[in-house]
Amino acid sequence: MAKSGALAPLKIRDFRYLLAGFAIGQMLMPLQFITQILWVQHFAPRDIWLIMVALIATSRGLGSLTFGLYGGALADRYDRRKLLILIQSLQVLGTMGIAAMMYLSDGGMAGFVLFFGLTFITAGLQAIDGPTRLAIVPDILGPALTPGGISLNQVAGQIAMPIAMMFTGLIIDAFGYSGAYLFSVCGHIIAIICVAMMSYRATPVADSSADKRYGFSEIARDVAVGLRYARNHPVILWVILLLVMMMSLGYPATASLGPTWVTTVVGVAIPNMGFIVMFWGFGSFLGAVAMTQLASYPNRGALMAFGAILFSLSFVVFVYDHTIMNAIIGNVGLGAGMTITMVSATILIQQLAPNDIRGRLMSIFQLNMAFAQLMTMPVAMLAQWLTLPVLFPILSFATLAIVIVILLAQQQLWRGAAED
């Protein structure tokens, strides 16, 4: 493997461990998310079931928004390896709690309150894990190999996702909601083992900061530094705004409520639902593989713009007609477009961000997912009134229009100035 080739990061032992833990955890995430949606869809009252499904994404979004910026500050202050182990350990407890609640609850109010509370907490933990995991990649690989490493991260995360999605409905049908959800604990445990085996240690300066007081005022100050840097850097600012707008309009309908669209509008039975939504994972895999081949491509902004347009057009296809073929083609494009956009934007921001605030900038960038999940509730409320077939096409054309307007108004994002 060449030193700068697409597979060059795999020569680094610590990166292989980080990659393996990330991949195993990612391949089980669809199982968690879809199981939650179908459990709520099954037990919620019929007159508000769509709103209850949307509360899942709202709980996730609130957790991400509450802990996201804090997570970035922690990643810049403490040993990133130790922080990952701690967060994954807490995720094991949270996942087991949700699985136990699914097993014991009959769909009563107390069960739903506990379910959404635990979902909020685990989403908050994930909001700390995400920027920490992204911030540690340049520490391990250095700037030259980081683009290839981020691309390989996506490949590893997506390579098993189509299979995981395909069998999700079958696993739920065979083991029930609680059994299927409990299975995902294995991913967190393996991720802990992989990170623990890494030889990476924090620099003495970073490690010594862990002994100093770190109260609310210090947290607020660190977060403010990251927000100020992002606001004053035009490329980083507009990359974040592009992703926030695209995901806030596109993600609720295609991901948070995507399984609901497939099972209620397209009319696919739950045991077969996984065979449809797995094509999102297949598209993500294709997009991730393409990004590894383009690891040395200099204009990340142009790739990001292409991915955003692909995602928006695929949203239009996904909801244009209520057929299985439209759902399949749309899911492939949605997965590929989202992966290309996210990977390109992540690499671009990491290239522009100083190491001492990289974690905070990555946490700000990842807030696009928090806003996307929070938008699921107003989308669901509108859909309860207008119906899904009426609302979703409107959202798809609005997403495409906004993406095009931003890219035309901020041409520095894709004309190469972003990398200067």
Image (tube, helix red, strand yellow):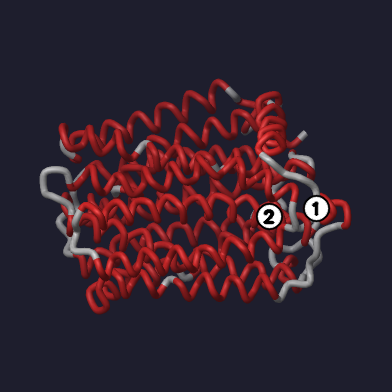
Spot occupied by residue 159 in the image (x, y as percentages of width and height): 50, 68
227 or 389, nearer to the observer: 227
120 or 236, nearer to the observer: 120
Image height of 255 relative to 65, above or below = below
417 or 43, nearer to the observer: 43
Spot occupied by residue 377 in the image (x, y as percentages of width and height): 31, 38
In this picture, residue 150 sits left or right of residue 163: right
Residue 45 visible, this angle: yes
Task: Give, as a three-letter code, the residue at label 1.
Answer: Asp
80 or 413, nearer to the observer: 80
Spot occupied by residue 306 in the image (x, y as percentages of width and height): 53, 41
Residue located farthest toward the right when viewing the structure as drawn: 204
The disc label shown at residue 211, or none = 1
**Marks 2/1: CA–CA distance:** 38 Å
Crowd class of label 2 (few under 14; some 14 to 19; many from 20; radius 10 Å): many
Kindly state the secondary structure of the residue where label 2 is placed: loop
The quadrant of the image that shows the C terminus is top right
Query: Which numbered mark, 2 or 1, is in the foreground of this view?
Result: 1
Kindly state the secondary structure of the residue where label 1 is placed: helix
Question: Which of the two labelled residues, at mark 2 and mark 1, occupies the earlier sequence position?
Answer: 1
Mark 2 lies on residue: 295
Image height of 407 relative to 356, above or below = above
Task: Give, as a three-letter code, the residue at label 2.
Answer: Ala
Residue located farthest toward the bottom when viewing the structure as drawn: 174
In this picture, residue 290 sits left or right of residue 231: left
Residue at 71% of width from left, 76% of height from top?
Answer: 197
Residue at 24% of width from left, 56% of height from top?
Answer: 40
Residue located farthest toward the left when viewing the structure as drawn: 46
